[in-house]
């Protein structure tokens, strides 16, 4: 596939030791050779790097002192010829180099266009391309490892395996229908079909089970700190932010850039959602009513419910306990440096097996235990095994759910003894949903939309 030559600044905007202008396409080397003072780039070997200067062809002035890497197709990221011009100056000079290559006939790349080419040229599949994006946005080491594994094609290989298994089943039924005269082909029975669909169904279920953790890694755990006024909610929030590296991220692609604060607790990214709101409102139950607050709480992945060791339980506390029943929460009994007035036994009973941690935030006691409890609530140890494939992408999760649903339809049809060629319709649909994950059956508009979310220059 011959495509035009694209160019972009591939390093973050701003002052840095080096900035890279990257070119990809059929004229990449020709364009670079035309503005480079040094060795003749059109005759150097692939994957070599050369020192020299970039000349502005209009003024014949030296624009920048550079190192230029030449990588010839097909062994490159995009499978096209790639040239990377390493500039060592600041923003002005790198922009000047970009302008020069554009003047020489390159086109400015759209966001994600390099990766899109890698996909279109068959170097990576869609889930791998998305992993590149996840990698850029990863907020913790664990999230980064998940993205790296996905980039390596692990998820793709699993999906391919399921699809292959389904395809064999589909083909088997087809042969039975189209060539009934072939006696040597075993007739696909309901039992065989049941066995096949059940097998894949179990695997999809397992994949979806770990998906929840993947989503948390990717997006952070939305965490609400609740409790009556003066129990220590703000103090808790401050302690968490101070003790852990706060990560501020900008999520591009939304109408206005949202800036969110994350704290990284033992590798678990907590997204402190609307905590300011809850702090200002003090008593959320009273202010917005039990029903509304229940709704707010339901949207949180984790609730930190703070109680005061120095006060007796109140009716409000009981209301809050009722509001969070069935949700994921941790009870924090704060101010243990003061006299005990709280009925701890009653609290443990109300917690119904969820962790109850005692802290004294002024004396900095109990914070370690709290952090352990947070980590254990979500990753009861198994995340570090590292061998599982985590699905962390919402699009993938949705498609896996659809695939599982249509397999369940197939299984239900089997139970009702429907003819196999009807059951096969649902099996085929499952195969298609799975194909969308890796981009095999994905539509062009979906692909365009996905790649437009990338950073420029990737
Ligand atoms: P919020 O209203 O729930 O956000 O509570 P704050 O975090 O503002 O804390 C209320 C008051 O309790 C402040 O004066 C804090 O210094 C104090 N406080 C917080 N944690 C502790 C604690 O562990 N022990 C004691 N004695 N006071 C605390």
Image: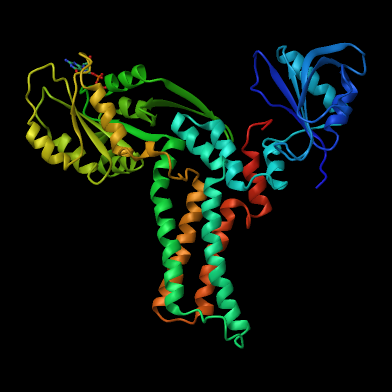
Say if 207 sits above or below 312 in the image: below
Q: Tell me which colouring the rendered structure shows.
A: rainbow
Q: Quadrant of residue 41?
A: top right
Give the residue furthest to the front.
Answer: 184
Q: Quadrant of residue 272?
A: top left
Q: Quadrant of residue 375?
A: top left
How far from the left and from the top, in percent, is residue 177?
Answer: 59, 83
Say if 146 sits above or below 232 in the image: below
How far from the left and from the top, in percent, is residue 2?
Answer: 83, 45
Q: Nearer the viewer, residue 180 or 130?
A: 180
What residue do we see at 63% from left, 58% from top? Answer: 441
- Locate the C terminus by quadrant: top right
What residue do we see at 76% from left, 19% from top? Answer: 95
How far from the left and from the top, in percent, is residue 205?
Answer: 40, 56
Q: Quadrant of ligand 1?
A: top left
Residue 409 visible within the image = no
Residue 306 visible within the image = yes
How far from the left and from the top, in percent, is residue 262?
Answer: 42, 27
Position of residue 113 in the picture relative to residue 420 (left or right): right
Q: Nearer the viewer, residue 422 or 295?
A: 422
What residue do we see at 55% from left, 51% from top? Answer: 157
Position of residue 85 in the picture relative to residue 171 (left or right): right
């Amino acid at each position: 596939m011959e495509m035009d030559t694209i160019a972009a600044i591939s390093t973050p905007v701003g002052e840095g030791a080096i900035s890279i202008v990257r070119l990809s396409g059929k004229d990449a080397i020709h364009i670079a050779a035309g503005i480079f003072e040094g060795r003749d780039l059109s005759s150097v070997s692939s994957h070599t790097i050369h020192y020299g200067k970039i000349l502005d062809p209009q003024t014949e002035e030296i624009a920048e002192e550079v190192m230029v890497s030449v990588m010839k197709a097909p062994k490159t990221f995009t499978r096209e010829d790639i040239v990377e011009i390493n500039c060592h100056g600041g923003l002005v000079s790198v922009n000047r180099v970009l302008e020069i290559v554009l003047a020489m006939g390159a086109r400015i790349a759209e966001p994600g266009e390099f990766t899109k080419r890698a996909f279109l040229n068959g170097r990576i599949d869609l889930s791998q391309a998305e992993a590149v994006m996840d990698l850029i946005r990863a907020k913790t080491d664990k999230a980064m490892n998940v993205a790296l594994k996905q980039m390596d094609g692990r998820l793709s290989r699993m999906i391919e395996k399921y699809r292959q298994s389904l395809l064999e089943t589909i083909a088997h039924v087809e042969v039975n229908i189209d060539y009934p005269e072939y006696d040597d082909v075993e007739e696909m029975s309901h039992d065989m079909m049941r066995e096949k669909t059940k097998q894949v169904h179990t695997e999809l279920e397992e994949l979806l089970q770990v998906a929840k953790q993947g989503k948390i890694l990717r997006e952070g755990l939305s965490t609400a700190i609740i409790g009556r006024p003066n129990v220590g909610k703000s103090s808790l929030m401050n302690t968490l932010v101070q003790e852990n590296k706060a990560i501020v991220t900008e999520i591009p692609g939304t109408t206005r850039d949202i800036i969110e604060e994350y704290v990284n607790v033992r590798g678990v990214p907590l997204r402190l959602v609307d905590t300011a709101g809850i702090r200002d409102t003090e008593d959320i139950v009273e202010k917005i009513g039990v029903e509304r607050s229940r709704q707010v709480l339901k949207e949180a992945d984790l609730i930190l419910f703070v109680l005061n060791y120095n006060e007796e339980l109140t009716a409000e506390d009981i209301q809050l306990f009722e509001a969070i029943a069935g949700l994921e929460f941790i009870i924090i009994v704060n101010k243990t440096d003061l006299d005990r007035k709280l009925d701890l036994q009653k609290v443990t009973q109300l917690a119904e097996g969820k962790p109850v941690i005692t802290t004294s935030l002024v004396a900095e006691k109990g914070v370690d235990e709290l952090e352990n409890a947070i980590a254990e609530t979500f990753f009861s140890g198994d995340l570090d095994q590292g061998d599982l494939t985590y699905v962390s992408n919402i699009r993938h999760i949705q498609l896996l759910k659809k695939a599982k649903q249509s397999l369940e339809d197939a299984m239900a049809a089997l139970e009702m003894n429907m003819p196999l060629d009807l059951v096969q319709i649902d099996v085929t649909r499952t195969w298609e949903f799975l194909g969308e994950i890796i981009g095999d059956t994905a539509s062009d508009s979906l692909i365009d939309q996905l790649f437009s979310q990338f950073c420029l220059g990737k």
